């Protein structure tokens, strides 16, 4: 019998920064998060990504956002796919660009920045910051410790108001 692949997100929160931080110099870069559409899908170089982002962008129930630096908006640092569930936001996918993964990554803080943005969308929509997602079993404790997420049932986790506001205030100074 073929072993079923575990479903769930497997992003690592490397560091909660106030933007993104160059790993070698410590320099902090201001970021921008912008919605992706079919019109700008060609900005996603398939070699930099593990997931099928074209499918996510074409799915009308989801919104895909890209994280870039303000000074270089053509290079995508990370992507996130979220869905409005009418009382919370659900995070389907999140991924750092290939050059922001593993020990030789260029920037720290990409996943934290994207999760904080999803929490901000939740607040902006009146959902008090509630964000849900499914986690890989091995990362549940990591998300509890870094994002102050709560395990709901099985692999389902959520970030509630206080944790969301903490993340938002870390990344967004508006």
Image (spheres, rainbow, N blue to C red):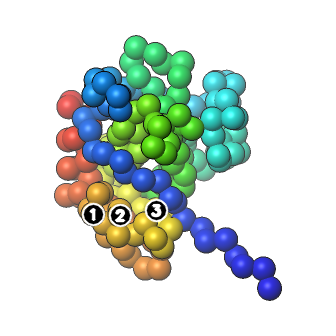
| Residue 83 in sight here | no
In this rendering, the answer to whether 58 lies above or below 24 is below
Q: Is residue 57 left or right of residue 161?
A: right
In this rendering, the answer to whether 145 lies above or below 120 is below
Q: Position of residue 154 (x, y in %)?
A: 47, 79
The residue labelled by disc 1 is: 145
Q: Position of residue 96 (x, y in %)?
A: 50, 41
* Callout 3–callout 1 Cβ contact below 8 Å: no
In this rendering, the answer to whether 110 lies above or below 141 is above
- Could you tell me which secondary element the residue under label 2 belongs to? helix
The residue labelled by disc 2 is: 142
- Could you tell me which secondary element the residue under label 1 belongs to? helix
Mark 3 / mark 1, whichever is N-terminal:
3
* Callout 2–callout 1 Cβ contact below 8 Å: yes
Which residue is nearer to you in this view: 61 or 173?
173
Q: Nearer the viewer, mark 3 or mark 1?
A: 1
Q: Is residue 82 left or right of residue 30?
A: right
Which residue shows up at 26% across the image and 53% down it?
A: 164
Which residue is nearer to you in this view: 39 or 142?
142
Q: Nearer the viewer, mark 2 or mark 3?
A: 2
The residue labelled by disc 3 is: 133
Give the alpha-carbon distance from disc 2 to disc 3, as whole Å: 14 Å
Give the alpha-carbon distance from disc 3 to disc 1, as whole Å: 16 Å
Which residue shows up at 54% across the image and 55% down it?
A: 92
Which residue shows up at 35% across the image and 32% down it?
A: 23
């Amino acid at each position: 019998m073929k072993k079923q692949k575990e479903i769930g997100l497997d992003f690592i929160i490397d560091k909660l920064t106030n933007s993104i931080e160059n790993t070698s110099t410590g320099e902090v870069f201001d970021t921008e998060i912008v919605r992706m559409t079919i019109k700008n899908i060609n900005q996603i170089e398939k070699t930099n990504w593990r997931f099928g982002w074209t499918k996510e962008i074409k799915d009308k129930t989801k919104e895909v956002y890209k994280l870039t630096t303000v000074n270089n908006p053509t290079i995508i640092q990370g992507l996130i796919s979220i869905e409005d569930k009418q009382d919370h936001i659900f995070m389907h996918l999140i991924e750092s660009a290939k050059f922001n993964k593993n020990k030789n990554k260029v920037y720290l803080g990409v996943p934290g920045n994207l999760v904080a943005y999803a929490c901000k969308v939740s607040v902006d929509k009146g959902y008090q910051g509630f964000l849900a997602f499914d986690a890989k079993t091995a990362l549940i404790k990591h998300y509890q410790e870094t994002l102050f997420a709560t395990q709901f049932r099985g692999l389902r986790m959520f970030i509630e108001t206080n944790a969301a506001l903490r993340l938002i205030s870390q990344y967004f100074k508006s």
